[in-house]
């Protein structure tokens, strides 16, 4: 779950959610100006205007952050009607005082307690309509009594609110990255899936709990996905595609009540990732090593991409290789491995594996298959790993002997952990690119004995 950011644009549906109506894409700040000009009076005290603008921004960001409408299959972020959201009048004039205030406040929003998501700052007029949240006309009275904008917000939303100021601005990108997550997938999105499933399981206890949400799609994760799919009438395949992804978002947001005034909320610890969302010069760790593994392999098929060492340190050579890869594949050339570059690396690695030149076919069984090998895996790839582990175990007593049965069970995991221990890798028991590389290197070293 990414930390909140302010989008550059927002898609507004000019009507009720199920009403046939036009969608318009407008700059986020312009949307806030439009709503504020439609909801507020420019003659109100400045403190009242500021408090209301904070509420409008926070309400809007909550809709975007929770993907309230997109998780329900709609192709917009918010509607233009006060029955569901806020009043937006396409093409209307903007009041000068509101224009100035929004330019200052559009990337500031309200949070509550230790929660990080933009607070669902529900509000109403307080005259013709009443609600549990902020009363717009009531803010005028409070402002005239000398309360500050923050004190006005505290009056309605509680003393434990905070204002996040100058939040980063980014393109409004849907959370679903456009790939299928299945047994062997790994990364921060898998960890989000695991955490969402575990929270949903508290309300739907037939869903198996995932003991360690570590970003690796293992057998327990697959079983949890399958049960989730059964409960919510989705095709039961244990694979998280777009429909399952957004149903997970919808149910997760629902059980945590993220779009309600009294929300369970999301805390900072719930957003901490095993895999960093972006890797850049100076970073270290196994995720850097995985990027280097892909770059080194791809570089053997493209002269413009240098073949680099796999040392898990993002130095100048790795940065130059990232530059070259991004330039070759039409990506933003910034030397940073973000989501686009990460999935492009995996896609190109997989493409090369599927179309290896004839001279590489002899070595194809020694090439990483492109996905983590975990508990629940079976078949030819598992047999290949077990065969290599057998050879290593015969030469090194630190690695336990196993049988080749094509099933990734406890014995295989123990042998993998032993190799990881020898190679100074995290002892996960799962075979990712770096562990595969360590197994192959030891296998090549010992098989001639």
Image: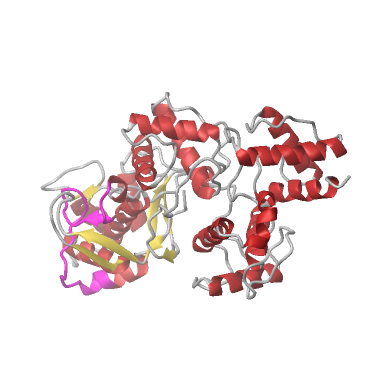
Is 223 above or below relative to 317? above
Q: Which of these two is toward me, 356 or 234?
A: 356
Residue 75 located within the stretch drawn in magenta: yes
Q: Position of residue 440 (x, y in %)?
A: 75, 49
- Stretch of the chain drawn in magenta: 73-99
* Residue found 25% across the figure and 55% down from its top: 78
Q: Which of these two is toward me, 19 or 291?
A: 291
The colouring scheme, among rainbow, by chain, secondary structure or one colour, is: secondary structure
Q: Position of residue 159 (x, y in %)?
A: 39, 44
Q: Quadrant of residue 398?
A: top right
Q: Is residue 283 visible?
A: no
Q: Position of residue 195 (x, y in %)?
A: 49, 39
Predominant SS along the magenta part: loop
Q: Position of residue 73 (x, y in %)?
A: 27, 48
Residue 268 located within the stretch drawn in magenta: no
Residue sticking out furthest to the top: 206
């Amino acid at each position: 779950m990414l930390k909140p950011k302010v989008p550059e644009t927002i898609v507004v549906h000019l009507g009720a959610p199920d009403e046939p109506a036009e969608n318009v894409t407008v700059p986020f700040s312009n949307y806030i100006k439009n709503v504020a000009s439609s909801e507020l009076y420019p003659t109100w005290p400045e403190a009242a205007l500021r408090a209301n603008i904070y509420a409008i921004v926070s309400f809007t960001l909550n809709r975007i952050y929770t993907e309230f409408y997109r998780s329900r299959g709609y192709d917009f972020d918010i509607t233009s009607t006060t029955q569901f959201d806020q009043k937006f009048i396409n093409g209307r004039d903007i009041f000068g005082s509101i224009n100035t205030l929004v330019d200052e406040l559009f990337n500031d929003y309200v949070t509550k307690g230790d929660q990080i998501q933009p607070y669902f700052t529900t509000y109403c007029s307080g005259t013709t309509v009443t609600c549990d949240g902020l009363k717009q006309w009531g803010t005028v009275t409070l402002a005239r009594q000398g309360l500050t904008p923050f004190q006005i917000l505290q009056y309605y939303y509680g003393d434990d609110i905070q204002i996040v100021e100058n939040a980063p601005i980014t393109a409004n990108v849907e959370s679903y990255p456009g790939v299928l997550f299945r047994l062997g997938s790994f990364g921060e999105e898998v960890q989000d899936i695991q955490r969402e499933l575990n929270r949903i399981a508290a309300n739907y206890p037939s869903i198996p709990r995932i003991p360690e949400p570590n970003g690796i799609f293992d057998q327990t994760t697959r079983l949890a996905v399958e049960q989730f799919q059964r409960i919510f009438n989705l095709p039961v395949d244990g694979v998280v595609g777009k429909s399952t992804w957004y149903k997970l978002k919808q149910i997760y947001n629902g059980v945590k009540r993220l779009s309600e005034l009294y929300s369970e909320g999301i805390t900072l610890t719930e957003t901490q990732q095993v895999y960093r969302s972006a890797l850049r010069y100076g970073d270290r760790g196994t995720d850097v090593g995985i990027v280097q593994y892909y770059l080194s392999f791809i570089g053997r098929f493209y002269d413009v991409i240098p073949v680099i060492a796999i040392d898990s340190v993002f130095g100048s050579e790795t940065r130059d290789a990232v530059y070259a890869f991004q330039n070759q594949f039409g990506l933003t050339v910034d030397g940073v491995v973000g989501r686009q570059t990460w999935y492009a690396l995996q896609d190109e690695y997989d493409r090369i594996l599927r179309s290896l030149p004839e001279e590489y076919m002899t070595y194809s069984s020694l090439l990483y298959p492109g996905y983590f090998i975990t508990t629940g895996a079976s078949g030819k790839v598992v047999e290949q790993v077990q065969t290599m582990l057998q050879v290593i175990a015969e030469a090194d007593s630190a690695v336990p002997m196993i049988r080749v049965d094509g099933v990734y069970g406890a014995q295989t995991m123990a042998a993998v952990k032993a190799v990881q221990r020898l190679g100074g890798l995290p002892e996960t028991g799962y075979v990712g690119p770096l562990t595969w590389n360590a197994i192959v290197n030891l296998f090549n070293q010992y098989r001639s004995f």
